Image: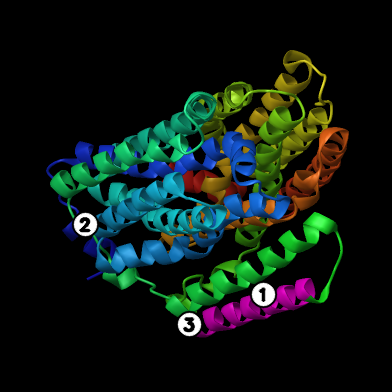
Amino acid sequence: MSANAAVRSDAKSPHPNWTLAACILASSLSFVEGSVLNVALPAIRGSFDAGASEVQWVVNAYLLPLSALLLLGGALGDQHGRKQLLIIGTALFAAASLLCALAPDLAWLLVGRVLQGIGAALLLPNSLALLNSSFTGEERGRAIGIWASVGAGAAAIAPLIGGWLVDHVGWPAIFYINLPLAAGAILIAARFAAESRNEEAARTDFPGAMLATLGLLGVTYALTLWSVQLTVDPRVIALGLAGLVLLGLFLWVEARRGDTAMMPLAMFGDRCFTGTNLLTFLLYGAFGAVMLLIPYVLIEAGGYSPLQAGLALTPLAVIIAVASPLMGKLAARIGGRLPLTAGPVVVAAGLLLATRIDAEGSYALTVLPAVVVLAAGMALAVTPLTSTVLASVDQRHAGTASGLNSAVARTGGLIATALLGAVLAAEGAALVGAFHTALLVAAVVSASAGAVAWLTVGGAAARTRKAAEA
């Protein structure tokens, strides 16, 4: 039986719309967590009297397992059942959220964040795979569109809700709001969703997952230590080298496993696939850094409340959610090269505009223009990036390629956050100055992503159009 046939034979659900509801609720946990935490970071730092490197780990303790284990989570669902892994991941995320809310000290908060990342790595790929198996034809496209739109909407409103909760209830409340979402997802999935699996496509590459996790941990830890003081000591060197060696072993293991690897290296033989993933790493690294820094600086230097900081970023998520589908249609006609070149360049322009943000500037004249331009640039790139990545590989590798690209995006954010120690350690005028320097570096990185697209995506335009027409 072919892999596709295996999926179809398991995917007969009498309640596909309830499956959609369960997948939306589960994946919203990750979408909300990705945007709500940034407005709460100053309050968390003050509550635990945390240093700059500790603030970085509040973010990266979640991103590290999510980046390293996302592909393994999808493979486990292929082998053991997507519904089962969705429920397990959601339950783990809920338990971890409760641990974060009740954490008596920073160490327990970081443990909870790690467990949240593992839960998200299980639920995210399986929510989309479960949708893919529960719907067919046009209904599948409609369901995935609803899933993505609701996720974008949740990300847009989450900073507002989170800011209000931090102001009026306290930062632990941002973790409590995950509990009803998780309960709803688990109950609906258990009652209505049909199980689905694809054992022939499963890649339970545990050695690869372990090496990737430990390698990223070593590199991230080294960068975090270095970024606070901007000095290199023996511990930084040892951790960095150990991380690089482990990542090298990861690549060696993946090469030996071939098509059964978590990350089949043969896919990188395509210039477009390699280029779009490099673009993803650079663009999402730059964007992730600024999304952490803007609310942090507005609260710490600009005197904004958490709610005001959440409101300040609302236009960004709304513009991306509304404009991205339109850009998807345009990219289907003209190919991915132009939007993927222009998008990062526009993001770079938004980052340069953001250097006008300081402790005294007004929101309308300094923050809003930067937020609008940043949103326009990301809207240009988000949907064409996905379609171009998928068009650059064989259909049988489409799921792996999509998961890998998501992992690369989160790895970009992981590395960028690890490099922000000097900014987070600064105060007052020094914080604003360090923020401006970080923005200039991020603008160069984002513009470089546009150059990568121009040099590598050109040959894929026709393929992108063909994929859209198929």
Task: Specify the amino acid type for callout 1.
Answer: Gly
Name the outermost residue toward the bottom.
256
Q: Looking at the picture, does residue 54 appear above or below residue 274? A: above
Q: Which residue is mark 1?
A: 243
Q: Which quarter of the figure has residue 319?
A: top right
Q: Residue shown at 61%/68% (left/top)?
A: 217
Residue 93: x %, y % from top left: 38, 51
Q: How is the image coloured?
A: rainbow
Q: Which quarter of the figure has residue 137?
A: top left
Numbered tag placed on residue 257 in the rendering: 3
Q: Which residues are magenta?
A: 235-256
Q: Residue shown at 73%/49% (left/top)?
A: 449
Quadrant for the N terminus in the image: bottom left
Mark in front: 2 vs 3: 3
Label 1 to label 3: alpha-carbon separation? 21 Å
Q: Which residue is mark 2?
A: 8
Q: Earlier in the sequence, mark 2 or mark 3?
A: 2
Residue 458: x %, y % from top left: 68, 50
Label 2 to label 3: alpha-carbon separation? 27 Å
Crowding near the residue tagged with mark 1, few <14, some 14–19, many ≥20 C-alpha atoms within 10 Å? many
In this rendered view, identify the residue nearer to me: 98 or 124.
Answer: 98
Label 2 to label 1: alpha-carbon separation? 41 Å
Under tag 3, what secondary structure? helix
Under tag 1, what secondary structure? helix
Under tag 2, what secondary structure? helix
In this rendered view, identify the residue nearer to me: 414 or 150.
Answer: 414
Magenta segment includes 243: yes
Q: Looking at the picture, does residue 335 appear above or below residue 78? A: above
Crowding near the residue tagged with mark 2, few <14, some 14–19, many ≥20 C-alpha atoms within 10 Å? some
Task: Specify the amino acid type for callout 3.
Answer: Arg
Question: What type of secondary structure mainly makes up the magenta span?
Answer: helix
